[in-house]
Image (cartoon, helix red, strand yellow):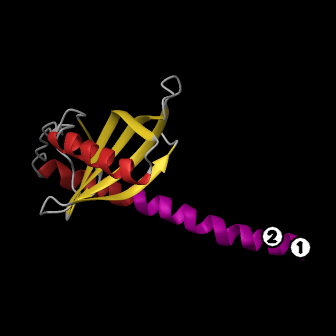
Amino acid sequence: MKKISFAILLLIFIAPLLFSGCASQESSENSADNISDQPEPVVKKADTLTISKEIPLDGGYSEISTDSKNVKESFSFLKKELSISYPGISLIQVQKAETQIVAGWKILLFCEYIIGDSKKELHFLTAVIYKDLNNNMTLSNLDFNKYP
């Protein structure tokens, strides 16, 4: 009984594979005859798309120069904000900057800072400054000791 059941199951699974192979051979033979009558398709090579790192993409962060106007303005704004909230912290420089276009801009700064007069030990922070369409800035995120 088990041998018969196994044989039936085997036929159930193998039969469709055998018949589909025959059908695909017939269709490929017929299609080969039809293809010779048709003109060859024209294939064009796509032009290479290059995106400048200076031009941010909608919806995503793009790296920008640390010397750009937006980065310099954001760094000055961040210095002022930190002097109020964290008077013992002194920002040194922007190591890396990225921007994201939203309804305005998000400028992501990766900065070096020191605490107090300790010029020996550098620390890192990331800050996101939001600049609206009227050029008003707000500090939307600040994360100490984080560096990419």
Query: Alpha carbon of mark 1 to alpha carbon of mark 2: how far?
Result: 6 Å
Tell me the quarter of the image containing the N terminus: bottom right
Q: Position of residue 53 (x, y in %)?
A: 22, 37
Instruction: Report the disc number at residue 6.
Output: 2
Q: Are marks 1 and 2 in contact (CB under 8 Å)?
A: yes
Q: Is the residue 118 above or below the residue 147 in the image?
A: above
Q: Is the residue 88 above or below the residue 34 in the image?
A: above
Q: Amino acid at mark 1?
A: Lys
Q: Amino acid at mark 2?
A: Phe
**Residue drawn 26% across and 49% down?**
77
- The reply to whether residue 103 is in sight is yes
Residue 132 lies left or right of residue 22; in this view the side is left
Chief secondary structure of the magenta portion: helix
SS at mark 1 in the image: helix
**Residue drawn 15% across and 40% down?**
69
Query: Magenta segment range?
Result: 1-25
Q: Quadrant of residue 40?
A: top left
Residue assigned mark 1 = 2
